[in-house]
Image (cartoon, coloured by chain):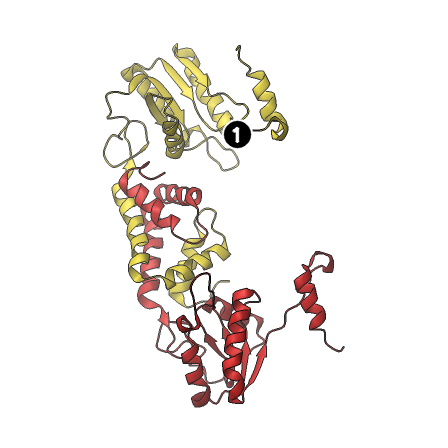
Chain colours: A yellow, B red
Amino acid sequence: MAGTYAGPVQDLIDELGRLPGVGPKSAQRIAFHLLKVPKEDAHRLARAIDEAKARVAWCQRCFNLSEGELCGICSDDRRDASVLCVVEEAKDLVAVEKTGEFKGRYHVLQGAISPIEGIGPDQLRVKELLARLDPEGVTEVILCTNPNIEGEATAMYVGRLLAPLGITVTRIASGLPVGGDLEYADEVTLGRAIEGRRAL
Amino acid sequence: MAGTYAGPVQDLIDELGRLPGVGPKSAQRIAFHLLKVPKEDAHRLARAIDEAKARVAWCQRCFNLSEGELCGICSDDRRDASVLCVVEEAKDLVAVEKTGEFKGRYHVLQGAISPIEGIGPDQLRVKELLARLDPEGVTEVILCTNPNIEGEATAMYVGRLLAPLGITVTRIASGLPVGGDLEYADEVTLGRAIEGRRAL
């Protein structure tokens, strides 16, 4: 649909179309929405983008999102420094935080190993993870990457690096979602749930 | 999820979540994408929003999007001023333009009558439509609003206003989409297709 609209409209549609999950139709719809709302409303979005980029960076220790050098979790003394939860992205960290089950610190790899997307271990914050273990006195690392191919590969890779270091390495459980129906579970998940069965 | 993230990140997620078709999950995904890409890339989107709002306004004649007082179509002398195609939104105008079937001018109502959303005829560019007919020598008006409840109501309303003025008023045909399957057509559409049958 290139060139269908006047310059600035097409530019806006093009830029919106680069966002994840936004196809050409949605980009057009969002652009027309922005053209219709009051100027202040549209500008608030533009400013929010620039503000976030200007103010938010990565925590220098765990690579979570942070406005300062250290994120809120890393600078919180009450967190247990001996247990490290390794996640792929900052949003996964937020998901774990919401459970209220974890009182340790995090390490955000900022991705997962994915040969298809050309992402190898070197593009992840693996070196930085290894460098933290000794100084922070880490005794357990929980590999909390996604239960998909990329996440499993990443957990496997990191786990193998940690094995010789005398640290307890665990992987989060796979199984049936709580409240889920056995009948509707896919066979891989159900298989994992049986494999990971625990004594009552 | 309010307050889960640091201020600027949550602000960005909130603003993105106001866009049409962008739910909380997509807003979060887009926000993290923007936080990850180079600053210039994110800023290009912010600038495109502000630019579009600053430079694009409505054509003073047909209410299409326009960078000047008149849009490209209204200022094109080769367009037939006697036939007016009435659409709901500028994107509908673009859709009609793409067919290459229409050589007249447009009138964009900037919406459709929708009691549910509280949009009555007064919020549409109906007055402006009526004011154009005489000065421009319009002899036919094609009602090209959407074939849904709001669009039909709008076409009916505008049609009734035009009826006493001695202008030919037509409505675009409803029927089966070209390339579509009779088997999969909904009954209303199929009914319309039969009702609107033409001699071969």
Kindly identify which chain the residue marked by label 1 belongs to: A
Q: Residue at x 69, y 68 (%)?
A: B193
Q: Which amino acid type is marked by label 1? A: Asn
Q: Which residue is mark 1?
A: A148
Q: Residues within 10 Å of mark 1 (few under 14, many from 20)?
A: few
Looking at the image, residue A98 lies above or below residue A170 = below
Q: Residue at x 66, y 63 (%)?
A: B188
Depth check, front residue: A178 or B94: A178
The quadrant where residue A127 appears: top left
> Residue A2 placed where, x, y %?
48, 63
Depth check, front residue: B187 or A30: B187
Secondary structure, mark 1, is loop
> Residue B50 placed where, x, y %?
31, 60
Q: Is residue B192 left or right of residue A198?
A: right
> Residue B20 placed where, x, y %?
43, 54
Q: Residue at x 40, y 27 (%)?
A: A87
Looking at the image, residue B66 lies above or below residue A121 = below
Depth check, front residue: A131 or B156: B156
| Res B38 seen here | no
